[in-house]
Image (spheres, rainbow, N blue to C red):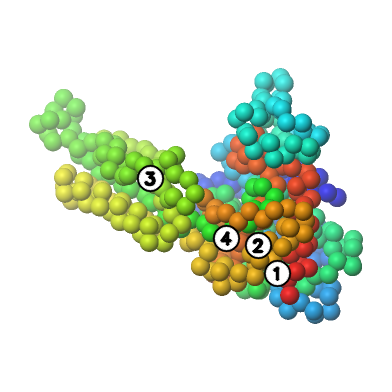
């Protein structure tokens, strides 16, 4: 089976993850896909295959090289998709031999993927594309990665002349809500290094990601009848939230940044006169600069508390993950092998920073250095998501080459 065929099959599993559910997995349907993958791994020769109580899938393919390779390598992808866009009832199809124009996804609903809006399509001219009908996400983030890892295992089973050492495979739930690595069993995985297969263009290698902080800011006002607000000294908590946001650097909002530039991003705000709450994510590749951003939030709170009274504003900021670069650099053979593997598969390595994070960021921090590889898919988290059929096969070739190159 080709990788794109597996992607189409996996897309039928409605595995959108839900941040409001504290359980793991947050969507019980993730268990259904997990058990399906467990069976596939077992059929493809993996041993000690299991789904744990939290929906994590593990499988281990024994070496076929007589012990020539000393390092044990791992590959990881996540099973969940976003839930902010409809993820149920996905109906993928293959657009054959994309010629470079607009793609009509759904004629009845007038849904068209326009080349002018998605210039990345130019990279896929001449390829077959897996697309949706425009009413749901495809789920290539990250079912394309899952499909490529499983297809790699099938290639090894079908061609025992392909050499490899010990390989570990892991599929995680709830990555899209930031919990994918929370309960990952690093000691069980027991690898010298691993790769998350969870990205965009074929050839991408990412080992620098944001340092991440999530912050909730609480505002406490003083409710007074509006007619008596002046005399009664009303303090409007919702207005405090707006004033707080205005104190943050305007040019460091996410819509004004790129490359290595970090940002403050207000992702939600709710409130009344008496109480309000704002949620922010802070991101920066530089560890020192992320600390400055945390201090900026604290100073804004101090300013408002000095103006309106102590205790009106409280900031709760928590570190979520760190830049994996400092850990991957200690095992840089992972990056060098990935470059050589991509070139051997006919691609050009593109080493670039992630303006986000992956499961690999947390796993690297926990002792499993884990850069990220592209999957040949694009436009993630939206109805215009797609994957390149031929690029997905090159990604499979890359994984096989990595196993060959690991010493």
Quarter of the figure with the C terminus: bottom right
Q: Which residue is mark 1?
A: 73
Tag 3 secondary structure: helix
Between the residue at mark 4 and the residue at mark 3, the CA separation in whole angstroms equals: 23 Å
Of callouts 3 and 1, which one flags the residue occurring earlier in the amino acid sequence? 1
Q: Are marks 4 and 3 in contact (CB under 8 Å)?
A: no
Q: Nearer the viewer, mark 3 or mark 2?
A: 3
Name which quarter of the figure residue 114 lies in. top right
The answer to whether residue 308 is above or below residue 131 is: below
Q: Are marks 1 and 2 in contact (CB under 8 Å)?
A: yes
The residue at 75%/69% (across/down) is 405
Residue 220: % across, % down: 25, 44
Q: Are marks 3 and 1 in contact (CB under 8 Å)?
A: no
The residue at 53%/64% (across/down) is 325
Direction from residue 215 to residue 379 in the image, left or right: right
Between the residue at mark 3 and the residue at mark 2, the CA separation in whole angstroms equals: 31 Å
Direction from residue 6 to residue 197 in the image, left or right: left
Q: Residue 160, which numbered label? A: none
Q: Nearer the viewer, mark 2 or mark 4?
A: 4
Residue 111: % across, % down: 66, 24
Q: Which residue is mark 4?
A: 207
Q: Residue 252, which numbered label? A: 3
Between the residue at mark 1 and the residue at mark 4, the CA separation in whole angstroms equals: 16 Å
Between the residue at mark 3 and the residue at mark 1, the CA separation in whole angstroms equals: 39 Å
Q: Which residue is mark 2?
A: 195
Of callouts 2 and 4, which one flags the residue occurring earlier in the amino acid sequence? 2
Tag 4 secondary structure: loop
Taking the image as drawn, is residue 16 in sight?
no
Tag 2 secondary structure: strand
Residue 386: % across, % down: 69, 39
Count neighbours of disc 3 (C-alpha within 10 A) and say few if under 14, some if 14 to 19, many if 20 or more.
some
Count neighbours of disc 4 (C-alpha within 10 A) and say few if under 14, some if 14 to 19, many if 20 or more.
many
């Amino acid at each position: 089976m080709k990788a794109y065929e597996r992607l189409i099959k996996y897309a039928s599993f409605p595995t959108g993850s839900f941040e409001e559910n504290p359980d793991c997995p947050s969507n019980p349907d993730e268990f259904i896909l997990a058990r399906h993958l467990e069976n596939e791994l077992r059929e493809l020769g993996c041993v000690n295959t299991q789904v744990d109580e939290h929906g994590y899938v593990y499988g281990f393919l024994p070496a076929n090289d007589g012990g020539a390779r000393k390092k044990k390598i791992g590959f990881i992808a996540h099973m969940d998709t976003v839930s902010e866009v409809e993820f149920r009832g996905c109906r993928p199809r293959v657009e054959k031999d994309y010629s470079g124009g607009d793609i009509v996804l759904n004629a009845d609903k007038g849904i068209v993927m326009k080349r002018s809006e998605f210039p990345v399509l130019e990279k896929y001219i001449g390829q077959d594309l897996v697309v949706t009908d425009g009413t749901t996400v495809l789920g290539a983030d990250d079912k394309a990665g899952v499909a490529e890892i499983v297809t790699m295992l099938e290639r090894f089973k079908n061609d025992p002349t392909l050499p490899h050492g010990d390989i570990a495979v892991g599929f995680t739930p709830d990555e899209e809500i930031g919990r994918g690595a929370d309960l990952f069993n690093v000691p069980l995985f027991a690898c010298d290094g691993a790769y998350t297969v969870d990205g965009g263009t074929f050839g991408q290698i990412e080992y620098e990601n944001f340092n991440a902080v999530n912050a909730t800011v609480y505002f406490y006002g003083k409710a007074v009848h509006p007619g008596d607000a002046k005399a009664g000294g009303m303090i409007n908590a919702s207005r405090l939230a707006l004033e707080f946001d205005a104190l943050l650097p305007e040019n460091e909002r996410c819509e004004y940044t790129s490359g290595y530039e970090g940002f403050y991003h207000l992702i939600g705000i709710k409130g009344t006169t008496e109480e309000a709450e704002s949620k922010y994510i802070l991101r920066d590749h530089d560890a020192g600069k992320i600390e400055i951003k945390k201090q900026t939030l604290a100073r804004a709170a101090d300013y408002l508390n000095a103006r309106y009274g102590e205790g009106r504003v409280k900031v709760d900021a928590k570190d979520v993950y760190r830049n994996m670069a400092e850990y991957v650099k200690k095992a840089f053979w992972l990056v060098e092998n990935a470059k050589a593997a991509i070139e051997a598969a006919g691609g050009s390595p593109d080493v670039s920073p992630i303006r986000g994070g992956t499961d690999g960021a947390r796993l690297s921090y926990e002792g499993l250095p884990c850069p990220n590889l592209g999957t040949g898919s694009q436009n993630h988290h939206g109805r215009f998501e797609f994957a390149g059929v031929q690029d997905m096969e090159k990604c499979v070739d890359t994984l096989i080459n990595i196993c060959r190159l690991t010493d």
